[in-house]
Amino acid sequence: MSYSQILGELERRYPDGAPAGINLEDLAQLKVQNTFNTHLDIARSMATIMRADMAAYDADSSKFTQSLGCWSGFHAQQMMRSVKRQKGTLEGAYVYLSGWMVAGLRNRFGHLPDQSVHEKTAVVDLVQEIYTSLRQADEVDLNDLFAELKTTDDRDAVIAKIDGFESYVRPIIADIDAGFGNVHATYILAKELIKAGACCLQLENQVSDAKQCGHQDGKVTVPREDFIEKLRALRMAFEELGVEDGVIVARTDSLGAGLTEKIPVSNGVDDLAAEYIKWIETEDVTSANPLRNGEVAFQRDGRLQKPSRLPNGLYCFKEGSGEDRVVEDCIAVLSDGAADLLWIETDTPNVSKIAGMVNRIREAAPHAKLTYNNSPSFNWTLNLRKQVREEWIAADKITAADYPDDNRLMSATYDSDALGVEADARLRAFQTDIARDAGVFHNLITLPTFHMTAKFMDDLSKGYFGEDKMLAYVRNIQREEIRDGVSAVKHQHEVGSDLGDNFKEMTGGERALKAGGAHNTMNQFENAA
């Protein structure tokens, strides 16, 4: 409801005034500033927004969405403030909640690798924290508008701003890893994530107790039936909690996974199990290669075969079968698992390679859409420069001797060279290109705030503990905050000191002891942000 409607409802409820002499306009303000009653309400609302965005993308591939991975609520809040300040709207901006960063930075057990060894409640806690921070940004900005309302001569204009206020709360894509256990454990965790506000859950097809980061070796996938059961668990959690528009991202790691932990039971025809088994590396059982005690064998193509097996009991897939398995994974989860979006974990950022797989998937599922990981695990500069070099050689624009084909291409020498300039142009266009050519609805970077924090702390520390001392902070941080209009430069206001002042005034009137007086040092930045 609008501010005027809320105030009108309160006036009807309390025709003689609210108890204890509470000002009805103050109550109306508090109701407006409380943009969502519960985080489950957030999940329902954000799911609806995400569905609308997906429909808009289907009609126009230039309307793809983006997110940055955030490991704190403050990171997410400042990201959204920046987007809104620059673009005037938050349309198309999401938050990505990275399981890697929860493992590495946000769990009780220390800095850990992305192997599902951290406590799963940490993921839920971070969703809760992010939405708490985004809601506080709503409160702070709306509180400023209500302060303006008390002093303005044009109340209608300010009320219009209040009623038209765009919440900082945006969809979260939450990484649930491989489910942190069996199907029931996945379902229980999914419910907790949804109740914390997540409208979109991302699940991967690795074995839960052998899970690896998508860009490391040793990945082990599960049979498709097992993965689909967990996708059903997510859908049932959404439905149970009344988030009918909840979105599921099914991620396949098959491109880089050469192992599986079990051979699924097949009925002997083209079922999901048979399609999975056909890619397992085998050798014929013969008199010269007999079946020994304890070995496993199965019938395939009219021949008795035994699968290639490692000492740890894991089975090997055929070399070079990853792309075919990816395509089959994606078709299966869309048709049998009712997934909404796909995630294909790739080893390099190559538009044509991604598009090639997606085009094969779309032969069976024309409306297939992807979430794509623009991962910091890729050396983007080196990859794109190598791609340009290879294309230029093939087109006879250069010879192989003109540029190195190894890490020397990373040299700053090539930053202003024609090849480096072309690679940077492709970086700028990369997300637009894969949205148009490869069906990518959502572009994300998983770990940007991990690397950003490391880089910024390195820059500041080198200067502050070096020759520049305070200049390092002032020149590189505070001065830039002021000039770029970053609201956090007024840090007391950013964390809600004005909210406290106004509430004290609502309850105590002239008796209120407020922090925002003449001696508040934030007044030095009054005209800065």
Image (tube, helix red, strand yellow):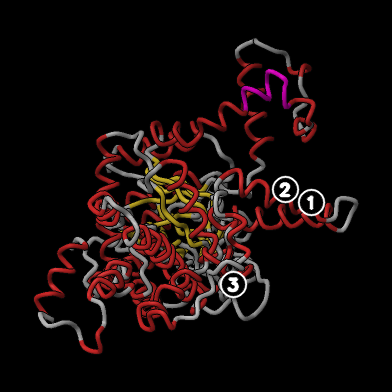
Q: Taking 140 as reference, is 183 above or below it?
A: below
Q: Amino acid at mark 1?
A: Ala
The magenta region covers 415-423
Q: Does dot 3 land on a helix, a strand or a loop?
A: loop
Mark 3 or 2: in front is 2
State the residue lying farthest toward the right: 467
| Residue position for label 2 | 476
Question: Residue 313: percent from the left, percent from the top?
Answer: 58, 71
Q: Residue at x 43, y 57 (%)?
A: 277
Q: Quadrant of residue 446?
A: bottom right
Are the residues tagged 2 and 1 within 8 Å (C-beta)? Answer: yes
Q: Nearer the viewer, residue 251 or 220?
A: 251
18 relative to 424 in the view: left or right: left
Q: What is the crowding at mark 2: few (fewer than 14 residues within 10 Å), some, or many (at least 20)?
A: some
Q: Earlier in the sequence, mark 1 or mark 3?
A: 3
Q: CA distance from mark 1 to mark 3?
A: 29 Å
Question: Residue 111: percent from the left, percent from the top?
Answer: 68, 71
| Residue position for label 3 | 106
| Residue position for label 1 | 472
Chief secondary structure of the magenta portion: helix
